[in-house]
Image (cartoon, rainbow, N blue to C red):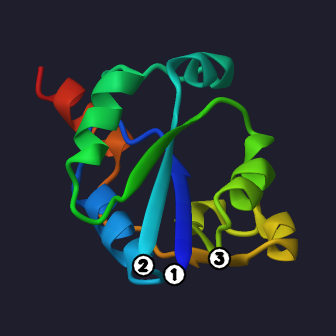
Amino acid sequence: MKRVITYGTFDILHTGHINLLRRAKEYGDYLIVAISSDTFNALKGKQAYYSYEQRKAILDSIRYVDKVIPEDKWEQKVEDVQKYKIDVFVMGDDWKGKFDYLKEYCEVIYLPRTVGISTTKIKTDLQSRK
C-alpha cells in the first residue's frame, strides 16, 4: 500500500482544497491529511474560522481522505512520515522547496494550485461585498 500525506489548515473549504486532495490521493492508496490544530494556528499567528474539530469532521467526510491527524508543530513532519510509513509527501507549489529535506525519507511532490481560488481570496471578496 502506497501512503501519501499532505498538510494544511483547511479552513473555509473550497474547490482548490478538493483539487489538492483528489490529486494527492492519485499518488497512492491511502491519504493522510494533517490539519493545523488551533494551538498551532495561534503560534503561526493565524485564526481559522472553524475549530480543529469542525475542520477534522469536514475532512473526514471527503472521499479522498482516509485519515485526519492534527499538526501541532512545524517539526513533526519527519516524525509523521516515519510513524505512518509515508511514501509520498504532497503540498501545493506555493511551498515549493520548503520541504525538500523530506526527500531523505519519501518522495516530495509540489502540486500546482488551483488558479483563481484561495481562502484568503474568499475572505477578501466577502469583505469587499460589505
Disc 2 marks a residue whose amino acid type is Asp
* C-alpha separation, residue under disc 3 versus residue under disc 2: 10 Å
Q: Earlier in the sequence, mark 1 or mark 2?
A: 1
- Name the residue: 23% across, 51% down: 14
- Split into 4 quadrants, where in the image is the C terminus? top left
Check residue 29 in the rendering and tell me which mark sits there, or answer none. 2
Q: Is residue 90 above or below residue 65?
A: below
Q: Earlier in the sequence, mark 3 or mark 2?
A: 2
Please state if 67 lies on the left or on the right of 1 as rendered: left
Residue 95: x and y in percent read 64, 60
At a point 54% along the width and 72% down the height, the residue shown is 3
Which callout, 1 or 2, points to the residue nearer the camera? 1
Q: Secondary structure at mark 2?
A: loop
Say which amino acid is labelled 1.
Answer: Met
Which amino acid type is shown beneath numbered disc 3? Answer: Asp
Horizontal arrangement in the rendering, residue 116 relative to residue 100 (left or right) = left
Q: Nearer the viewer, residue 48 or 54?
A: 54
Q: Label 3: which residue?
A: 87
How many numbered marks are there? 3
Distance from Cα at disc 1 to Cα at disc 3: 9 Å
**Residue 13 appears in the rendering:** no
Task: Quadrant for residue 126, please give it.
Answer: top left
Task: Indicate the quadrant where residue 56 lies.
Answer: top left
Kindly identify which residue carries mark 1.
Answer: 1
Residue 22 appears in the figure:
yes
SS at badge 3: loop
Residue 94 found in image quarter = bottom right
Q: Secondary structure at mark 1?
A: loop
Neighbour class for label 2 at 10 Å: few (<14), some, many (≥20)?
Answer: few
Q: Of label 1 and label 3, which has the lower sequence position?
A: 1
The residue drawn where x is 59% and y is 74% is: 110
Whether residues under marks 1 and 2 lie with C-beta atoms below 8 angstroms apart, the answer is yes
